[in-house]
Image (cartoon, rainbow, N blue to C red):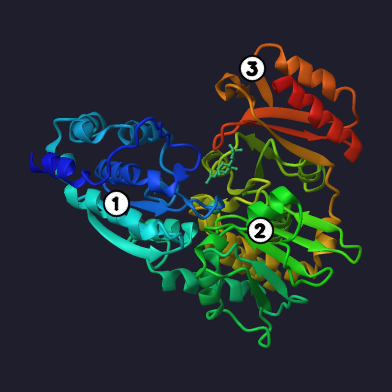
């Protein structure tokens, strides 16, 4: 088999790094960029297998999201634009850890294991891959390694150049649904902008939004892409949004995610240092690959107020629930919210008691939330850190698009819901699309960021990173809200929580770093600081 020789030859320039253990984690492989070429090569091979297996086009995104400029990463995108199926993460891990001299052999083993060895049609299928990268300096070199692998196993591929992560997910879904009843859109960047802009115009019709929005693009790919999208949107004079784009320097590579971006704002709980926004101005920050967004504003006293993923979820849910009711579909469509254990207790209470909507809690990581959201007709999912989107079931899409309106009010609601289906990137959480959605809802409600924040008041909370000797002993259960091991730790945490009002705390091993994360919330800031410290001692 010629391709086995080609694999061996093709991987020559990309030897495995001694003593490094690679793992396909929550967000694919991620590390210092120079360590990644071997891994990227093997990811190309996995994509080929996956494509044959699913008889569809598979996506590969090269990005390290909010991580420092010198890092990079890679993840695989399944046919509908969702994350790689979990059972395949193991194959990816196996291949990434295989040294060059054994790679062809290991590939053949996986080929037979994943593709049922004797069905030749499956083996002979043409594998198809699309890929893109963010603005990192290491991107082009890694693309070279990727192409070498794709060429070795005869994959038909298309390089989409620089894109946001959600754009690549969008492309994958478009390509695979072309000429089907579920077609998602044109598989081009232009198609992405046009789809979003059209839906946005429908939703904003006759509405205006007060004041500008300052968008911090983390000096990443979101900057140029947002500028491109704006060309398709109505201008501020035409009643559109007045965008003030900041931190959009993609020329200076080291600026990426440096003192800006969604991760900075969320973890530091402050605006980027050089913010030009005025008190009470609406601000938001994207992350380095534009799949995460958080909002915030600073008041006259210079107090910083974060409107995080929990807030975007409740904002969106209020709107979708209202529209569904006006459309007369509230008895037919089940709306729910999906959160992780990091969601503020006040947000959960607001959803359950005020909005009277069900809440599902899942472990951390987009794929878990995504799958849980797919079980609702309209599933709103967000991590507090700003990863999230809304999923509409096939049933919901059909009802929304085919219901006969009985009044102008109903027609408006149905048209609005229908536009939401297009505005919101249902393939994956998308900072730019989520931002437009939040803007639409704020415009409909004539809300300032302060009005939005006043819907409920967050419980004081604290996140601590604890370096431990061995994080693998920390096994969490119940959507990471409880520790099953080490023995006795959970009881201690619960005892500590009982000492404070409205207190809640949990500890979980990070999926991306060698550390344990402790989250605590309580009625006052003083109490929560104490509690977080005490729980950190339990795990230390
Ligand atoms: C990854 C996840 C993110 C999650 C974070 C948790 C994706 C695309 N990304 O970045 O959703 O919040 O990991 O990190 O799923 P941690 O396990 O280190 O706390
Ligand atoms: Zn990201």
Quadrant of res 239: bottom right
Specify the label residue 146 is tagged with.
Answer: 1
Instruction: Give the crowd class for mark 3: few <14, some 14-19, many >=20 residues within 10 Å.
Output: some
Give whichever of discs 3 and 1 has the lower sequence position.
Answer: 1
Locate residue 83, reporting x and y percent. 45, 45
Instruction: Give the crowd class for mark 2: few <14, some 14-19, many >=20 residues within 10 Å.
Output: some
Please state, as top left, top right, bottom left or bottom right, where the N terminus lies in the image.
top left
Locate residue 491, reporting x and y percent. 76, 15
Specify the label residue 484 is tagged with.
Answer: 3
Q: Is residue 318 left or right of residue 138?
A: right
Callout 1–callout 2 Cβ contact below 8 Å = no
**Between marks 1 and 2, how big is the CA–CA gap?**
31 Å
Instruction: Give the crowd class for mark 1: few <14, some 14-19, many >=20 residues within 10 Å.
Output: many
Question: Residue 308, can we see it?
Answer: yes
From the image, tell me which residue sits under label 2.
259
Q: Is residue 336 above or below residue 472?
A: below
Q: Within 8 Å: ligand 2 and the Cβ of disc 1?
A: no
Quadrant of res 121: top left
Element under disc 2? loop
Q: Is residue 89 left or right of residue 110?
A: right
Element under disc 3? strand
Give whichever of discs 1 and 2 has the lower sequence position.
Answer: 1
**Between marks 3 and 1, how big is the CA–CA gap?**
40 Å
Give the residue drawn at x 66%, y 58%: 259
Element under disc 1? helix
Give the residue drawn at x 33%, y 57%: 141
Instruction: Look at discs 2 and 3 and give the one toward the viewer.
Output: 2
Instruction: Look at discs 1 and 2 and give the one toward the viewer.
Output: 2
Specify the label residue 208 is tagged with.
Answer: none
Closer to the camera, 97 or 35?
35
Q: Is residue 314 above or below residue 135?
A: above
Give the residue drawn at x 71%, y 61%: 272
């Amino acid at each position: 088999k010629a391709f086995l020789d080609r694999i061996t030859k093709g991987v020559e320039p990309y030897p495995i790094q001694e003593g490094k253990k690679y793992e396909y984690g929550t967000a694919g492989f991620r590390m210092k960029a120079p360590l990644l070429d071997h891994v990227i090569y093997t990811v190309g091979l996995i994509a080929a297998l996956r494509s044959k297996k699913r008889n569809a086009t598979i996506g590969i995104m090269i990005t390290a999201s909010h991580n420092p400029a010198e890092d990079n990463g890679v993840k695989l995108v399944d046919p509908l634009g969702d994350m790689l199926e979990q059972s395949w993460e193991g194959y990816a891990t196996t291949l990434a850890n295989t040294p060059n001299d054994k790679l062809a052999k290991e590939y053949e083993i996986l080929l037979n294991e994943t593709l049922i060895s004797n069905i030749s049609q499956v083996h002979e299928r043409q594998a198809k891959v699309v890929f893109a990268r963010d603005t990192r300096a290491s991107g082009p070199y890694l693309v070279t390694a990727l192409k070498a692998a794709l060429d070795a196993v005869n994959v038909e591929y298309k390089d989409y150049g620089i894109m946001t992560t959600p754009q690549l997910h969008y492309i994958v879904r478009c390509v695979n649904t072309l000429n089907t009843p579920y077609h998602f859109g044109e598989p081009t960047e232009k198609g992405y902008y046009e789809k979003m802009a059209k839906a946005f115009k429908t939703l904003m019709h006759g509405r205006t939004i007060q004041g500008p929005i300052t968008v911090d693009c983390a000096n990443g790919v979101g900057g140029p892409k947002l500028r491109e999208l704006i060309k398709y949107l109505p201008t501020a004079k035409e009643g559109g949004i007045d965008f003030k784009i900041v931190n959009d320097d993609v020329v200076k590579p080291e600026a990426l995610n440096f003192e800006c971006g969604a991760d900075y704002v969320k973890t530091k709980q402050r605006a980027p240092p050089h913010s030009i926004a005025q008190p009470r101005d609406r601000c938001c920050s994207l992350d380095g690959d534009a799949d995460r967004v958080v909002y915030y504003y600073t008041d006259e006293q210079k107090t910083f107020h974060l409107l995080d993923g929990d807030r975007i979820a409740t904002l969106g849910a209020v709107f979708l629930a209202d529209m569904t009711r006006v459309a007369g579909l509230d008895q037919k469509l089940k709306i729910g919210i999906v959160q992780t254990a990091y969601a503020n207790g006040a947000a959960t209470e607001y959803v359950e008691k005020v909005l009277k909507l069900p809440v599902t809690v899942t472990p951390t990581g987009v794929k878990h939330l995504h799958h849980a959201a797919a079980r609702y007709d309209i599933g709103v999912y967000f991590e507090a850190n700003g990863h999230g989107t809304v999923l509409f079931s096939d049933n919901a899409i059909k009802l929304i698009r085919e219901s006969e309106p009985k009044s102008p009010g109903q027609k408006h609601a149905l048209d609005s819901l229908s536009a939401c289906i297009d505005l919101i990137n249902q393939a994956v959480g998308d900072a730019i699309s989520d931002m437009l959605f939040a803007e639409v809802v704020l415009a409909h409600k004539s809300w300032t960021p302060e009005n939005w924040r006043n819907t409920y008041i967050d419980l004081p909370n604290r996140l601590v990173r604890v370096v431990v000797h061995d994080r693998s002993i920390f096994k969490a259960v119940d959507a990471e809200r409880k520790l099953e091991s080490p023995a006795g730790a959970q009881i201690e945490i619960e005892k500590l929580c009982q000492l404070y009002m409205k207190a809640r705390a949990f500890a979980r091993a990070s999926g991306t770093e060698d550390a344990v994360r402790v989250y605590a919330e309580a009625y006052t800031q003083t109490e929560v600081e104490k509690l977080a410290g005490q729980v950190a001692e339990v795990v230390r």
